[in-house]
Image (tube, rainbow, N blue to C red):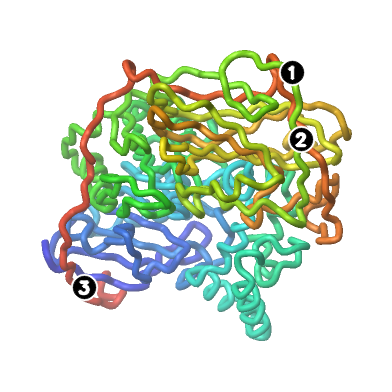
Amino acid sequence: MNEVEVYRDVMVPMRDGVRLAADVYLPTGAGQLPAVLVRTAYDKSAPVTDGTGEYVRIARAGFAVVVQDKRGRFASEGEYRVLRDDATGPHRDGADTVEWVAAQPWCDGNVGMFGYSYLGETVLGAAQAAPPHLRAGAPAQPATDEFVDRAFVGGVLVTNIGFWASLPMVAEDLVAKLPADRQEKARAELDAYRAGLPESTAAMPLTEQPFVRLFPHAWGDVLAHRDDPDFFAESRFARPEAEQVKVPLLHIGSWLDHFPANTVRQYCLTRDHADPAVRDAQRLVMGPWGHGGFTRDEFGSVFPGSAVDYAGMNIEWLDRWLRGDSLTRWDHPVVLYVMGADRWRTERSWPVPGAAARTLALTADGALRQGDPSPGTWSFTYDPADPYRGGRLQDVGAVDLTALHEGDNLLRFETPALDADLEITGVPEAVLHLSTTATDADWHVELHAVGPDGTAMFVNEGAARARYRRSRTAPEPVEPGAVEEYVVGLRPMSVVIPAGGRLRMVLTAGKYPAFERNPQSFTDPGTALESDLQKADHTLHSGPGLSRLVLPVVDPARRGEWIDNPWPLAPGDAEAAPVERQAAELER
């Protein structure tokens, strides 16, 4: 099957009568085929790089491929709502489209889905809606769970959710859908927003940021509902949603991506709570890529052999479940890339069976060590008007930030030089006992793998907002001077620090402009002004049972099997352009 025909702007009716536009790729003269559905908010007809949009290649592998604009985006009708209209609420667009595809004369009734980021979220949405003809899916780096892992981390706003709206593949269509008399002003605000990057993502007041303020569903509604998880319920994937899943899912994520916690959590939920017939068919793959960077082996640091054939791995997964092909590699429930060791490994489950908790105390003299330390305190002053400017791991990659760690607006802790390799695979946790002169504060924790030569690799981060120490939905001010316990959950990770290296932990009270600035007072951060920012002194308390870092450390004797790259990049294939057809011809 070499020649592929593409039918543009085929209109697919939803249950409420709204029609969504799709491009359909069909191998010439192939008859009935299993179908692969991709649903996107980023223009179905736009070229996509890094193997994520190789629709012609997938069609040449013997599939009908349907690529659809989400409701209200580009050629589709209806009103657009961010991360909505897939699984719950008034619309079930993913499920409706699956069933439409299955009923077409060129489809044999078997439909699979794949996609990364927003497109991965649509796979999960359709899977929990459970249309009868969906057979399998491969959600990669999905943008779900807004309340805990997209819009907010530990209750702290991630400012680039606004930046998302300014991206060319998003902004142009948002502006085009505004009334004509508002478009010129919107484009002027967009230019101002882009000109001020990256600082404009955290400009105060947040509610009045240029351009993004024009689109409440992408910005203002998030600010207005920061303590209301029910507002984000349509994007949530928890146990009730997992229980609705009736198909095998290949969960693809990465340690350096925006959403590794989503990917790992979704795998565990479906493995434990999906329809019993498919629980054992759930699979997890975790690499060291950036967002969408599956075909590259570098993101900050170089990770040899990590680049994969993303389209090929999806073809193989869908071949198995849509055509019944046998693939022995999928007998491994978990496949992960271990940074530092720079190798792929298989495991029987997640958390990996060979990991056990190891507690390192944070001492008043800046050490990370096992055992109970002497009581002591260590303080720093944080001024949100002169912030720590560390980037987010998923924005900067595994880079050396040592130069930022010499300031007086943070605390830095390190282990002694290691006498043996240390593998950390799992989800670490920092338990901090802190007092502050403020009535609110943010606690940002970073982990860095320091090599024997002194160079460091940024490998993990987490955050917690003080006002949410007792309840994420019922914030309360901090009593100045009171010692409180704060738990900072970090991201899933897998890294080996070699003998002679060290583990570094950094604690600070803000990361600008990656996160919103906390005024360090119990006020509304959304409406706070630069003039509201206050300096505060923060004190860490160490001693028996107090501040500590808990690590999932893998016993070398109990780890899984090292393997070669299971999806090496395919040789370059000069892919012929599809033959363009009219949508009406599809019905002939």
Q: CA distance from mark 3 to mark 1?
A: 69 Å
- Report the residue at 58% width, 35% height from top: 505
Label 1 is placed on what type of residue? Pro
Count all numbered tags in the image, as a single digit.
Answer: 3
* Residue 254 screen position, x and y as percent: 41, 43
Q: Quadrant of the C terminus?
A: bottom left
Q: Secondary structure at mark 2?
A: strand
Q: Which residue is mark 1?
A: 375
Please name the residue shown 60% across and 14% down the image. 371
Query: Which one is closest to the eye, mark 3 or mark 2?
Result: 2
Mark found first going from the N terminus, 3 or 1: 1
Question: Dot 3 corresponds to which residue?
Answer: 577
Q: Which residue is found at the position 44% from the left and 28% from the top? A: 424
Is 563 above or below relative to 348?
below
Mark 1: which secondary structure? loop
Helix, strand or loop at label 3? It is loop
